[in-house]
Image (cartoon, rainbow, N blue to C red):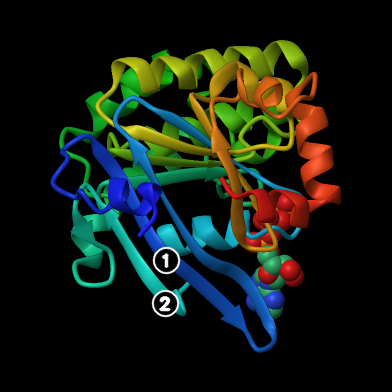
Amino acid sequence: MSVHEAKINTIADPDIILSVRHLRKQYSATVAVDSVSFEVRRNEIVGLLGPNGAGKTTTINMILGVLEPSAGEIEIEGIALAKQRTRALARTNFAAVYAPLPGNMTVYQNLRFFGLIYDVAQLNARIETLLDQFELRRFRDTKCGVLSSGEQTRVSLAKALLNAPQLLLLDEPTASLDPATAQDIRRSIRDIATHGNGGILWTSHNMYEVQDVCDRVLFLSHGRILLEGNPKTLPGEHGVASLEELFISLAREPLAYAESGR
Ligand SMILES: Nc1ncnc2c1ncn2[C@@H]1O[C@H](COP(=O)(O)OP(=O)(O)OP(=O)(O)O)[C@@H](O)[C@H]1O
């Protein structure tokens, strides 16, 4: 057993929000996710990085219970997703650009609709708080379909926080946003991680953003984790100048990193 595996097997740790062990997803001959193990801790933002097709979305969809793993275990605050699905998923939420909210409903209607699905207590008060937190009050009665990308992202984040999730999954939350709006969104999310009660798993192809916001990153390639560490120090540890350079060399020569181990 590796040191990493020994560490994630100490499951009693109450600060482990998400524990993923030996997760695997196979489609016929394609192994999309291949024995992936990692954890997300309380108040931590973990970046899930990797080139196109590395297995990031597949991993996220298994954690969301949308895809059934071929093997492996997922626990959210110690609750096994496979055994207590409803309890585990009640602690989870997500936002992704490929999952926009219904465009023919207003911001308020969307938040109310999802709040009822999540069975949020004191829903109206929760919606009002989120409208203020994400500066959405003036769009309250605007249909989501006519909002700009940045405004829609803010609504998606508000929706993702309705049930005050312990585990927040964000799949490229700032894709297609202008730099200033992206920075505002990053600050909001950083704030949620620091002052909230949960942890965040974040995917992004923007290495500047990852360095800015993530406490730890996992590099995925061909369904496997090849590297893990602090995005601010990892490039230096591997003799390159930036996270982007490390990403590129890892994407081009994954075998060199697989052989050197994590
Ligand atoms: N339903 C499916 N059937 C067959 N292969 C699939 C299926 N879904 C995903 N794959 C394959 O699994 C691999 C991982 O895909 P995934 O979407 O998880 O990658 P990703 O890291 O999210 O990529 P991107 O950065 O492009 O979004 C890819 O090779 C993809 O073609």
Q: Amino acid at mark 2?
A: Ala
Tell me the quadrant of the picture where the N terminus can be found. Answer: bottom left
Image: 96 above or below 180: below
Q: Quadrant of residue 75?
A: bottom left
Q: Name the residue rendered at 80%, 48% in the picture.
A: 251
| Residue that carries the numbered disc 2 in the rendered image | 71
| Residue that carries the numbered disc 1 in the rendered image | 22
Image: 208 above or below 218: above
Q: Name the residue rendered at 77%, 19% in the picture.
A: 178
Q: Is residue 228 left or right of residue 68?
A: right
Q: Position of residue 110 (x, y in %)?
A: 45, 42
Q: Is residue 175 left or right of residue 55?
A: right
Image: 160 above or below 134: below
Q: Name the residue rendered at 42%, 20% in the picture.
A: 131
Q: Quadrant of residue 236?
A: top right
Q: Position of residue 72 (x, y in %)?
A: 38, 71
- Residue 226 versus residue 132: which sits nearer the camera? 226
Image: 98 above or below 30: above
Residue 164 visible to an observer of this rendering: yes
- Residue 82 versus residue 104: which sits nearer the camera? 82
Marks 1/2 in contact by CB < 8 Å: the verdict is: yes
